[in-house]
Image (cartoon, rainbow, N blue to C red):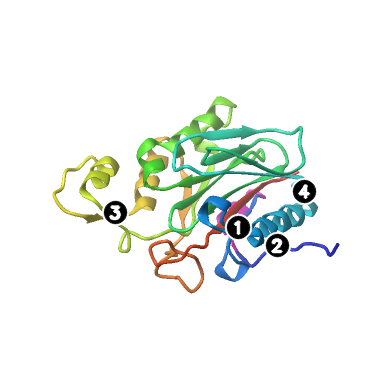
């Protein structure tokens, strides 16, 4: 069997400063969708290749899930190897060497890392933003003695505020403001407010929009069925 290599991707540079590797695949890598998105066996093969490529990087295990736009974040330790896919979760915290991954199109991939090596990947669509999935992940770090002011957070490529329009009900759930017509909303800006409120001081955000930069990334709002994968590695 040939040695697997990482698919075409964009590195998350802000996390490299604390020795954590994170990246998001590009359109060139192909789709990392899952069966409920109508994908075929090729997408599953890409996930398997990703798991094999991560192992030499000190990540013997890869955690992923069937995402449901909720607020459930799972905690992963050791005790298993290979690619794990569980049901009904939108975030993964890794406290032992391994990797956490989420699939996205326009939702925000949130990368969280602590200098101790604990990491997390969070899938934040509008429901996750409104429900507080990012604060939930931050609380999980804090509960393990890893406070918010020691974390490094990066908000990855997603649909931008100019391209993302939502109905009046969704807008009110996200902002608390009433409106009578569809409005544009910036999910990364809302998440940035949340991380600051919880005491995170080291955070950054990608300037790339999945729809504006549709030649690089898949975008549901641009009509794509494909999805990229956002992955973060807990170092050995």
- The part of the image, by quadrant, that contains residue 120 is top right
The residue segment tinted magenta is 10-19
Q: CA distance from mark 4 to mark 2?
A: 13 Å
Question: Label for residue 58?
Answer: 4
**Which mark, by number, is residue 23?**
1
The crowding category of the residue bearing disc 4, from other C-alpha atoms within 10 Å (few below 14, some 14 to 19, many at least 20), is: some
Q: Is residue 181 above or below residue 10?
A: above
List the residue tagged with mark 2: 6
Q: Nearer the viewer, residue 10 or 61?
A: 61
Residue at the far right: name it: 1
Nearest-to-viewer mark from 4 and 2: 2
Closer to the camera, 34 or 47? Answer: 34
Earlier sequence position, callout 4 versus callout 1: 1
Q: Which mark is residue 185?
A: 3
Residue 111 located within the stretch drawn in magenta: no
SS of the residue at dot 4?
loop
- Label 2: which secondary element: loop
Count of marks, rendered view: 4
Question: Sequence order check: which comes first, mark 4 or mark 3?
Answer: 4
Determine the CA span between mark 1 and mark 3.
Answer: 25 Å
| Image location of residue 185, percent across then percent down | 29, 54
């Amino acid at each position: 069997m040939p040695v697997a290599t990482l698919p075409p991707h964009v590195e998350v540079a802000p996390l490299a400063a604390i020795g954590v590797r994170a990246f998001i695949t590009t359109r060139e890598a192909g789709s990392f969708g899952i069966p409920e998105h109508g994908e075929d066996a090729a997408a599953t093969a890409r996930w398997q290749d990703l798991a094999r490529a991560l192992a030499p990087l000190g990540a013997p295990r890869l955690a992923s899930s069937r995402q449901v736009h909720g607020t459930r974040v799972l905690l992963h330790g050791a005790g298993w190897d290979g690619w794990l896919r569980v049901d009904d979760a939108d975030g993964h915290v890794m406290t032992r060497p391994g990797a956490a991954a989420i699939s996205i199109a326009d939702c925000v991939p949130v990368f969280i890392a602590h200098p101790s090596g604990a990491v997390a990947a969070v899938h934040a669509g509008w429901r996750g933003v409104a429900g507080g999935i990012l604060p939930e992940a931050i609380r999980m770090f804090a509960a393990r003695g890893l406070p918010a002011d020691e974390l490094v957070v990066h908000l990855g490529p997603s649909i931008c505020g100019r391209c993302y329009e939502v109905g009046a009900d969704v807008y009110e759930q996200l902002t608390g403001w009433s409106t009578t017509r569809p409005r544009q909303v910036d999910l990364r800006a809302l998440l940035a407010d949340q991380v600051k409120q919880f005491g995170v001081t080291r955070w950054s955000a990608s300037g790339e929009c999945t729809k504006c930069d549709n030649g690089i990334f898949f975008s549901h709002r641009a009509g794509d069925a494909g999805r990229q994968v956002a992955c973060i590695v807990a170092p050995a």
